[in-house]
Image (tube, grey):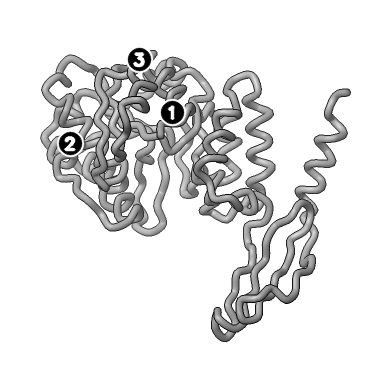
Amino acid sequence: MIDEYVVYYLNELKKIADIVFVSDSDLSADELKKVGPFVLKSIAHKHGEYDFGSYKRGFLDIEEKLNNYDELIFANDSGYGPFFPFTEIWEKMALVPCDYWGLFKHLDPRVATWHIQSFFIVFKKQVFLSSRFRTFIKDIGPQKKKEDVILKYEIGLSSVLEHAGFQSASLCPQSDENETHQKKTYELTRNHKFPLLKKAFAIENPCREPYVYKTIMDLQDFLSDKYSYQLIDDNLRRTAPKNYKDRWFHPDLIKTTLLHKKFIRIKETSGKYFCFMTIKLFGISCFVFPSRFLFRRWKYERGKKKTTPC
């Protein structure tokens, strides 16, 4: 299914670019009609090679026509937005001397290598017409898991281009932290016009942030006249696990197995203002009791009630 936030994204991207839409899904003709007005072509079939597999297929489809373009964009649908017009971002980045750029540059601690995060990268002509770039893209193949894609292709692409002498830049200040998946994403949006909210931050909270709820609400307030939060909410309701909001309020929920999961299990879940401890014996819930008070959530919601106009 193509969600409305994707349609909105393509509509905004169409204002600065011609688009080849590639999906790692066998989409129906009715679904593809949603993006028809915004794209040159749609390619929709299961390939199992993650976003870089889609980038490869889009590149190969348009390769012979690339001489007619000044820049090539790789963008995926892992973020909600844009919250600001792409034209504003292009005006800013046009003043930055570089061969390719992205929205965020990150130092991955696993390999201690700086790289442009691959959810949105812009390559200039000297890059996408180079043999190094073409060889790299054409060699993309299936990987067993997402982490392998990040190491081999996201980090690998920046490494190949840097070794080829190409210079990178980013819209936001580079960081040794993955700020796009942390509460700092709000600061990036507010201070540097970072245009997207990463879906993983809202659904998975991979960096175990304690303030996801407040960050989401602050972003919602900040974007009230810039972007419809309904697009985010509709997608989360459809695709996120039913208990995804539990991760917004307490990052270190207990999920411990004692002796063996068939005998004793201890799990902590988030309620409205309390976390609740559940103890199961032989798979049967025996004890449920409040384990801690979610003070920050109570304080935040209390503050919102005070400031809500009558």
Which part of the image, by quadrant, shows the C terminus?
top right
Disc 2 crowd, CA 10 A, few/some/many (<14, 14-19, 20+): some
At horizontal 53% and vertical 51% (from top left) the residue drawn is 204
Return the mark for residue 37. Answer: 3
Check if mark 1's residue and mark 2's residue have beta carbons within 8 Å. no
Residue 52 drawn above or below residue 96: below
Crowdedness near tag 3: few (<14), some (14–19) or many (≥20) residues, C-alpha within 10 Å: few
Mark before the other along the chain sequence, 1 or 2: 1
What is the three-letter code of the residue carrying label 3?
Answer: Pro
| Residue that numbered label 1 is attached to | 6
Residue at 34%, 51% in the rendered image: 113
Q: Secondary structure at mark 2?
A: helix
Horizontal and vertical percent for residue 302?
A: 84, 41
User: Quarter of the image containing the N terminus?
Assistant: top left
Q: CA distance from mark 3 to mark 2?
A: 30 Å
The mark nearer the N terminus, 1 or 3, is: 1
Q: Earlier in the sequence, mark 3 or mark 2?
A: 3
Task: Provide residue 122's location: percent of width, then percent of height.
Answer: 32, 28
Is residue 89 left or right of 37 when viewed as pictured? Answer: right
Q: Is residue 136 left or right of residue 193?
A: left
Give the Cα distance between marks 1 and 3. Answer: 13 Å
Q: Which mark is residue 133?
A: 2
Marks 1 and 2: which is nearer the front?
1
